Image (tube, grey):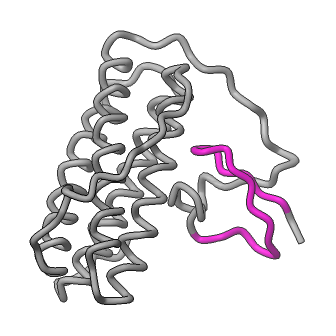
Amino acid sequence: MNVYKCRICGDPYVGNTKPSNCPFCGAPAKYIILAENWVESAVPELTEVSRKNLEASLKLEIENTQYYRCAADSSKDPMAQAMFKALSRVEAEHSAKVCKLLNHTKVEIEDDPRACLGVTDEERLKEALRREQSAVKFYTSAAASAKEAPVKEFFDALVEVESDHISLSNLGLGLPVEVA
């Protein structure tokens, strides 16, 4: 058995092998290291651009967490429920990391049962796809403008994670899935 830590969210994982993605924030395996090699990094001094991008990221991640929780609760399909529940947890983990980078206390995300009512699972998947595509576009830009190494790495990882979510939404919609 080994203990691993994710460089993006900092959460530990215990297992015989490194997971393909962090089970908490979804970061790809390249961001997961043996815990014995972990070095806690200090919260960097943020540029105004990075601060604004992180604040926008926090809003986006909270809204997506609320959306996915609502979608999980509203769906009648067990597979869709599981997918939306998993996505809500990953998005909540992203918001927690943003709070760390902003040096804020962790935000409690309240459920919003109105976030997705009155739609089918197909419509929910289409909305998930739209949200993830928008997130990838935003995080690509945020990573390009970040001057602080930990912030750039975080946004770069989110591009990869949200791209995986696009593939998941496409799979649910029966659309082609790109494999990296």
Horizontal relation, residue 93 to residue 168: left or right:
right
Say which residue appears at 27% left-offset and 69% top-offset: 71
Task: Indicate whether 91 appears above or below 23.
Answer: above
Asked whether residue 123 is drawn in magenta, I would say no
Q: Nearer the viewer, residue 26 or 79?
A: 79
- Residue with the most extreme front position: 113
Q: Quadrant of residue 106?
A: top right
Residue 104 in the image: x percent, y percent? 52, 22
Say which residue appears at 37% left-offset and 27% top-offset: 54
Say which residue appears at 48% left-offset and 39% top-offset: 108
Horizontal relation, residue 11 to residue 73: left or right:
right
Magenta stretch in the rendered image: 3-20
Q: Quadrant of residue 51?
A: top left
Q: Nearer the viewer, residue 111 or 166?
A: 111
Question: Count the marks: how many?
Answer: 0
The quarter in which the C terminus is drawn is bottom left
Residue 146 in the image: x percent, y percent? 38, 24
Q: Quadrant of residue 61?
A: top left
Residue 72 in the image: x percent, y percent? 34, 72
Asked whether residue 8 is drawn in magenta, I would say yes
Residue 2 in the image: x percent, y percent? 86, 65
Say which residue appears at 49% left-offset and 38% top-offset: 153
The quarter in which the N terminus is drawn is bottom right
Task: Indicate whether 55 appears above or below 33.
Answer: above
